[in-house]
Structure formats: structure tokens, C-alpha cells
Image (cartoon, rainbow, N blue to C red):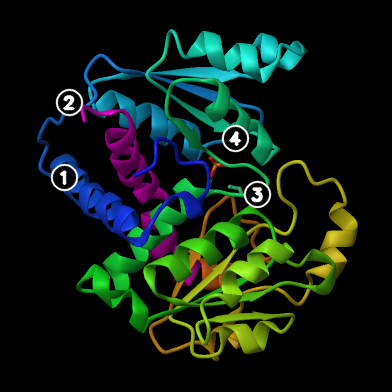
Amino acid sequence: MKKHLLKMADLSKEDIFEILELAEKLKDYNKNKVSHYLLKDKTLGMIFAKSSTRTRVSFEVGMSQLGGKALFLSTNDLQLGRGEPIHDTAKVLSRYLDGVMIRTFAQQDVEDFAKYGDIPVINGLTDYAHPCQVLADLLTIKEYKLKKLDDFDKLKLCFIGDGFNMANSLLVGGLTVGMSVAIANPKEYEILQDMKDFGAKFSGKFLFTNSVKEAVKDADVVITDAWCSMGQTDKDERKAAFKDYKIDSNLMKLANKGAIVQHCLPAYRDEEISSEIFDLHENEIFDEAENRLHVQKAVMVKLMGEK
Ligand code: CP
Ligand code: NVA
């Protein structure tokens, strides 16, 4: 595995399977109350330039369960927020911390931190990628739909909504583990060309479309995300552009019988997902949220643990 987790494409299929297997083991330890201090005395810094519920709490609790400690560092309080360069921040924090998780806007900022610092960097969401979330989604999909990891290639995943961080990371993660992936975005909010190019390498397995109906046809996993992500200000235009890009009971009729629904949360009921479908699938969605804890612990053990 590489030193950092900056985007889904940093992980090979084997890396993803190793993370999911370790996450299942760690989840079992929690269930059976078995102590597992695999990062004893290690410290994770958590730099946040955006809000968070799940990411902040699951990383902090995860470090505590692994016998280490996590520090919450808001960019409002760090000198970084007053213009101290990433170069200097990365050099200094590398002398105190054993690893860092960063949630920010530009992907380049996490790439730069990794370049200038000496410690493993984990992307806790940028505008470009949300790899920790997609690892949690993959674990949940495995739990609900598969007996073994090798069977991912029997499934079709579809994502409906904005061509933003979740669409990008699901596209890369889904195709890497062998699923068929369909992405439906409205014209003005399509995924980036490099994502379409990545998908094109998986011939017969990847569909990009503006049609939600085409994307959801025969899907086993149906996923959406907020129409308006953190940092986006054109809320009214987005509401208009995305009004037909929602998961509701009519759309679910086109998916395979027994299809599951995933949502990274926070969800906006009756915008990107109807209340009815959210309620019907809430166990899958809250299991997905719980799995953030288990997969992130696995990632931290792999990147920060004894080699
Ligand atoms: N899904 C997710 O990353 O949630 P938070 O924004 O609450 O961390
Ligand atoms: N796309 C959303 C995901 C939130 C977890 C955002 O970036 O705000």
C-alpha cells in the first residue's frame, strides 16, 4: 500500500480488499469487546476546513479504540487559516504527529501536505475525493449483498446526482473492485473529463449518462448525495438543475429487486432522496455511517501501525 490515502486511485483492488478484511476483524473486536491497541501512544491530527459530524467523531473514537489519541485542529484556529504555508505547517506537524487526516476544499492542498510532510496523510474529504466514505460504502455493500469479496463483479452500482467528490470516488472505487458503475449527472454538473477517461478503461463496465432511468436500470446499489455540497453557493440554480435527479419509489422500481440504497449523509429528505425511500432503507444508510469507524481504523492501522 502507498504511504498516503489521498484519493481512491491510490488503492489497488488488493489494498481495498485488505482494508475491508481488517475492518471486518476490527468490527468484530468491537462487537466482542476485545481490546485492540494497535496504535498505542500514536497521535493523529485532524485538520478541518469544513464542517463534519461523522468524520470527526469516527476518527476520534477510532483512535481512542486503537489506544492512541486524536487532535481536532480547525483551520479557523491554526495559523494555516491566517496564511502560514502548507509547506511549513506540514514540516512542523510532522515533528509532533504520527499521521494526519485533512478535510478541505482543494485536492492540491492534501497532495502538498503529503509532499512536504513526513507522516501519512488521509483525505477526510476534498472537493475531488472522499475515499474514507467509499471504503465504508464498499464494506456495507459487501455485508448486504455478498458472501465473499471476489463477488463484487456480480454487482451494478449507480450514483445519481452531482459530479463531485462522491461521484468521483464511487466511480474509481466501484470499478476497481470489479463492479459495473453507472453515473448520472445533469448536463451542467457532470463529472470531470479525467473521471470519464478513467471509466472508459473499464470497457463494458462503465456508463456515464444524463438519464437517471438509464443509470438505475438493474442496479443492485443505488447511491446519491446532497445537491448542494459544502462550499457550493449556487443553491437555487442547483435545486432547479437537480430536480429530476432524486431517488424515489418510482425510480427504485427500475433497480434490481432487493437493491440497497446508500447515502454518505447528511441527507436532505425530499430533495435528492424521498423521505419514503430514506425510511425504507435507513438501516443500510446508518450501517454505512457506522462502517466509517471500522474502515478508517483499518486504514490508520495500515498507514500508521508497526510495519
Ligand atoms: N459523510 C460524511 O463525511 O459526513 P460528515 O460530513 O458528517 O463528516
Ligand atoms: N458531497 C458532500 C459530501 C458530504 C459528506 C459535500 O462535499 O459536502
Type of amino acid at the residue the image marks with label 3: Tyr
User: SS of the residue at dot 1?
Assistant: helix
Question: Which label lies toward us, 2 or 1?
Answer: 2
Q: Is residue 162 above or below residue 135?
A: below
Q: Give, as a three-letter code, the residue at label 4.
A: Glu
> How far separated are the C-alphas under marks 2 and 1?
15 Å
Q: Is residue 183 left or right of residue 284?
A: right
Q: How far apart in space, not on screen, are marks 4 and 1 (Cα)?
A: 36 Å
> What residue is disc 4 on?
111
Tell me which numbered mark, 4 or 3, is placed earlier along the sequence: 4
CA gap between label 4 and label 3 equals 12 Å
Task: Give the residue pinned by disc 3.
Answer: 128
Look at discs 2 and 3 and give the one toward the viewer. 3
Please give the range of residues in magenta: 279-307
Q: Badges 1 and 3: C-beta atoms under 8 Å apart?
A: no
Screen quadrant of the N terminus: top left
What secondary structure is the magenta-colored segment mainly? Answer: helix
Q: Is residue 251 left or right of residue 40?
A: right
Residue bearing mark 1: 31
Q: Position of residue 303 (x, y in %)?
A: 33, 34
Q: Amino acid at mark 2?
A: Tyr
